[in-house]
Amino acid sequence: MYMEGMNQDNLFDAAALLKRAGVQEGMTVADCGVGRTAAVTLAAAQLVGERGVVYACDVVRSVLDVVKAKVELAHAGNVRLVWTDLEVYRAAKQIIDESVDVVVLADTLSQSQRRAAMLHECARMVKPGGTLLVVEWKPDQTVLGPKVEHRLYTEELKPIAELNRLEILEEFEAGEYHWGALLHKR
C-alpha cells in the first residue's frame, strides 16, 4: 500500500505524523536521530517552508553526510545538520533551550541504553507549549524492528515524561509496526 509521504524505505507516513503533531509553516522542528532515510527531516522541511527551520540531529557523522546529500538534492535550504549525542544534556549546543516547536524522536529511543537522558535532552529543546512526537516500534515481535527487549513501552515513557514537564496528550497507531505519542511541554 502506498501512502502520501511514504516510500519503500519508510515504515510510517512522516508527513502525516508531523501534521498530527501540529507542524506548520514557519515553525522550528528538530528531528532527533534523523537516520539515513531523512524521511522526517525532508517532510518537516517541506511543511515549515522557507521561514521555518529543521534541525537534523544524529550521533553518526556518516549518517549526516548521507542526509546532507539528500537535503541538497531536495533543495531544502532550511535544514541545519547537528552532530550530537542525544544522551548527553546540552550536547546539541546549536539548539537553544526551549526554542523548538516540535521535537521528533522516531525509532531512536529503542536504540538507547540511556532513554531518560535522551528524553531529558529532547525536552530541553521543546518550547513551553510545544510538542514532543515519539514514534517507536510496537512492543510485540514483528518481522521488522529490534528485538522485543529493546523496544519501548508507553508505560516506560510516562514517568520519564513527567520528570521533564511533559504530559502525554495522545497515544496512537503510527503504522503497521509503530505506535506514536504526542507529549505537550508545560
Image (tube, grey):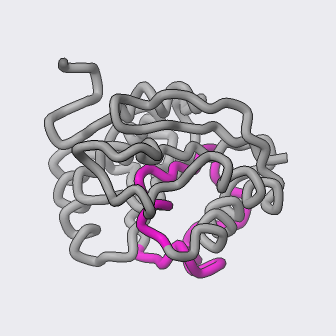
Indicate left or right for 131 with 5 as reference.
right
Decide whether residue 104 is among the magenta residues: yes
Give the residue at x 73% y 50%: 158
Give the residue at x 57% y 43%: 133
Across and down, in percent, residue 81 comes to 38, 65
Indicate left or right for 35 with 158 as reference.
left
Give the residue at x 41% y 61%: 33
Count of numbered circles in the view: 0
Q: Main secondary structure of the magenta part?
A: loop
Near-viewer residue (20 or 149): 149
Across and down, in percent, residue 58 comes to 39, 69
Give the residue at x 35% y 46%: 141
Decide whether residue 137 is among the magenta residues: no
Figure check: 7 above or below 74: above
Near-viewer residue (85 or 54): 85
Magenta residues span 83-112
Q: Determine the image quadrant of residue 181.
A: top right
Figure check: 73 above or below 125: above
Q: Is residue 144 visible?
A: yes
Quadrant (top left, top right, bottom left, bottom right) of the N terminus: top left
Near-viewer residue (148 or 135): 148
Near-viewer residue (29 or 58): 58
Q: Is residue 55 visible?
A: no
Indicate left or right for 125 with 141 as reference.
right
Indicate left or right for 61 with 127 as reference.
left
Q: Determine the image quadrant of residue 62.
A: bottom left
Across and down, in percent, residue 40 comes to 37, 44
Across and down, in percent, residue 2 comes to 19, 20
